[in-house]
Image (tube, coloured by chain):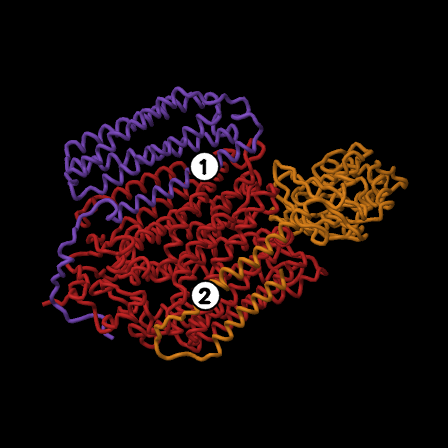
Amino acid sequence: MASVAERLEGIWGERPGLITWLQTVDHKKLGFKYLYTGMVFFVFGGIESLVIRAQLADANLEVVDPETYNQMFSMHGTTMMFLFIVPVLSGFGNYFVPLMIGARDMAFPRLNAFGYWAFLGAGIFMHSSFLIGKAPNNGWFNYVPLANSEFTPGVNIDFYVLGLIFLGFSTTAGAINFIVTILKLRAPGMSINRMPIFVWGELALGLAVVFAQPPLTAALVMLELDRKLGFHFFDSTQGGDAVLWQHLFWIFGHPWVYILVLPAFGLVSMMIPAFTRRPMIGYIYIVVAEMAVALIGFGVWVHHMFAVGIPQIALSFTSLSSFMVTIPSAIQVFAWLATLIAGKPILKTPMLFVLGFVFTFVLGGLSGVMFAAIPFDLQTTDSYFVVAHIHYVIIGGSVFPIFGGLYYWLPKMTGRMLDERLGKLSFWLMFAGFNLAFFPMHISGLLGQPRRTYTYQEGLGWDIWNLLSTIGAFVLALGILITFINWYKSMKSGEPAGPDPWEAETLEWSTSSPPPEYNFESIPAVRSLHPMWEQPELRRGPQRPEDGAYLLASGHETLATSMLDATPQAVVEMPHESPWPVTVTVAMMVSFYGVLFDSALLTAGGTVASMAAVAGWFWPTGETQET
Amino acid sequence: MTTTSARTDATPGAEEQSLPHHHAGSVSPGWWGMVMLIVTESMLFGSLVASYFYIRFRSAPVWPPDGIPTPSLKLPLIMSVILWTSSWPVHMADRAARNGNVRALRLWLGAGFILGAIFLGLQLAVEYPEKLAEFGPTTNAYGSLFYTLTGFHGGHVLIGLLISLWTQMRAWQGAFDKQRHVTVQNFTMYWHFVDIVWVVVLATIYLSPSL
Amino acid sequence: MFWISLAVFAVVVAFLAVAYVRGHRKQTQLTEARWGGPFVVVSGIVAPSLILAGVFVVSLNDMMALSTPPQQPSLTIDIIGHDWWWEVRYGSSGAVTANEIHIPTGESVQLRLTTDDVIHSFWVPQLQAKTDLISGEVNTMWLQADEPGRYRGQCAEFCGLQHANMIFYVIADEPREFESWLANEASQAPEPAEAGASRGESVFLQSSCAGCHAVRGTEADADLGPDLTHLAQRETIASGVLDNTRSELAGWIIDPQSAKPGAIMPPTELSPADLDALLDYLESLE
């Protein structure tokens, strides 16, 4: 007679092969796809940054011509900001949120698949511009009127605009999926105040995206209407307004940069307890702070526009809120420090990245506070000082946690540990290289070097700082490469990880490494914020129905529970593999290329095909109880 | 540490056995998905409306500019009445679904569809040709805003009509009953959302220039 | 702000160091650290609120102080941004130049900033914060140089291919020197005295130069490119990229694209004799 585990395996298993690769809706496979695809784009963005640094190593170099340089810095920013960090954090989120909350999948598995394919499609769409030498060349925030067809008639801008509209579908789909999964699919007893902090971080990301993405979508659509059909939203000669673009972009853009760090902060709050062997201090404060950063972050967008000529009263309010938004970050920093002091850290590689993160992010936060002071901002905005700031907060605040997260979570995903010595080497090279690359930029910025300049004159005192930055960038790249080598090595011959190599506190460590397709043999009743530490029976095996667990072994099922208390409410049927998400994506790509190349046939054809594929997606097959 | 057991007894516990397998309303993840979609689409319309007022208040005091006449109210008000009235049959369809009354559900869905189609027809076949004679989306920023804002709304009405057709098809196939009707609920939420957005569009485009 | 930041950073690093040196515990400990809550509240909420409130008030004060010039401006200069050069107009006096802005020392000067094409940003770090040049808008700012000198400025908002080379200089002279500079700048071009320069004037007027550049006092009055009436007075050409010497000027005229690839000025074909004469003429435009 088949065991429960075998039954679940039969229900949830997906046959390996190309078809499954295209059709999978399993959150773990999709999470891993997001992760390594995001890392590929990270490498592209990194190569672009090395080209930039090579060109700027000295005054008046001619490593690349101005047009190529402008494409390099634009794609570096666009790729890193849109195609790397959020996808990688979504990768971790997709993989681990269901595991951490005791669910068998995300709330909308096919939407999840669509989110991944649309991300890949948008990334391919934007990078295909390189094939014709017309990559976006107007920076990652693409100001008008330079982005208008009058000043940049080439398709460079259209690749940017259409690519990001396309990506917006993915981002929004992912956000909605995170929100509903986190609110509705938690294990019984995992009330809202027993949710792991990483889960709170992904919830904050989801809620912020739902509100922040549309202003960008609106701006992008308006710009494309201007460019392709001759509308006048951003044309000041016909009643339009160039500053409107900036407002819409930054109403999206500023929350976006918090979106980049909030799940990373959540990840840090998972690693610190594991490597200090004690719970996070100040859980309530941290949770409130995560949400407060997301919320207050919507009120500060004008601080990107202090030099534009906006009335002082508006600037003053923005300055105030920009100072205020520091406070919830400070709360989290001191909660982490308190926990580190109380718990005394075990200095394995993930913890090194955590310490590096605190050091670097705090430095970036301090320079950020300086920008909240308007007179200071007016000198340093658009200079290398701000380039230094943004890299300190993003690399410090997001990339270091992500790399720590790799060392922490890859063992669960692959079943293999990464090499500790290579990990430490990678960390120190990254830490040293990063600081060498970006600290000097504070100085060259204060000496007057503007950003986005393909070269600079001799004799201004900028040369030495730029050279140091270039060297640091290559050291940083080497450090990153070592982690990738480590990753590859571990998958080939790493030490077996076992279910719980770190003896950590959350539910994902109760599964095998990697987890089975069905995640949990039984969905346990959760009675603590630290289930693996306070419910030791979870270490002895799956919880039994007698102890409150839910088996849900008669179908492709997971459990819906109430929003606040996680009281079980219903059994939810999950869809199996489906060809429709990737089909919709391909059809959409056709229509986007149609708009790009002014082909009514492709545009209409792609749109109709997308709608047909959506119909196919929803077509009732009796598989789930949908209706 | 073991992660699976040899357990062969898949009998669920008592609580699990009593859990429903069909669900609607706020128990259903699908319902929440629609709520989130409505939230994000509201922000999209909000961005367009904010852009309208931003450009308006940064323009010269004359609005609409360049000699374009203030929009007349007669046709929009007729269209509004038709659209808002359509919320009634849609609401009744939702009630019918919750009561398991399939015949009423089909009729009310049909009625709502007809009213929504009339609204869209009036916009495309009557209002737009009239307006295009005066100004187009490429005339100036006002034109761009007018057609984009009303056009986005019309696009959402069209999508609503398609969802209505789908829901009607499912209703005629007997897919809905007292327990299984979250699709109807999602459609009706979406439709009410579209109607509320029209309130905002009407106020912004048609009423506010007269204030 | 720098010292406050340094102090905060030192505190954080100190805490990190404390955490690092205390060794680590082996067993999981679920004890509540009761000092944790107050620690977070004091260091994460109370202290930052107080510090930041103080910094905010000071910064607001500074913002208001810096937005008004120390005295009534004695002069208004119009700056019009172009891809990739700066047009400089001295209002009623009629003086027009490019890429060099002369101002008198010790006096406040008002600048009115507009753009002919895309957004640029006017930044001369040693003298003043930056202000953007926005399409369809007029932004004003003030400058005051207390000491005579040459202050370097550069466009600070990405504006296309040659954004990196949109450089300008603010040259502060003693008021009397400024007045004489202004008077000269406002005047029409001097008549070419020598034969070479005279021939060069004809070359200028007959070739493509006059299609874009103005020399006040001649028929050349186009305003697509910089006004060249007193070109010889300027220290740099090509918006600060090249020194204003005969050979650099020659190279620039023949092929602007080699110094500024993408610049809107096209190459000009001239015979060596014509070029020589043209250079004589341009050098005469004091």
**Badge 2, how many Cα within 10 Å: few under 14, some, many 20+?**
few
Q: Secondary structure at mark 1?
A: helix
Residue B48: mark in rendering:
1
Q: Residue furthest left?
A: A1
- Kindly report the distance in space between the C-alpha atoms of the residues bearing marks 2 and 1: 45 Å
Residue at the far right in the pictured view: C193
Q: Residues within 10 Å of mark 1 (few under 14, many from 20)?
A: many
**Residue type pointed to by label 1:** Leu
Q: Position of residue A135 (x, y in %)?
A: 50, 50
**Same chain? Circles 2 and 1:** no
Question: Which chain can be seen in red?
Answer: A
Q: Is residue A494 visible?
A: yes
Name the quarter where the N terminus of chain C is drawn. bottom right
Q: Which residue is mark 2?
A: C38
Callouts 2 and 1 close, C-beta under 8 Å: no
- Residue A447 position within the rendered picture, expressed as x and y whole percent measured from the top left: 68, 59
Q: Quadrant of residue C229?
A: top right
In the image, the chain rendered in orange is C
Q: Which chain is purple?
A: B
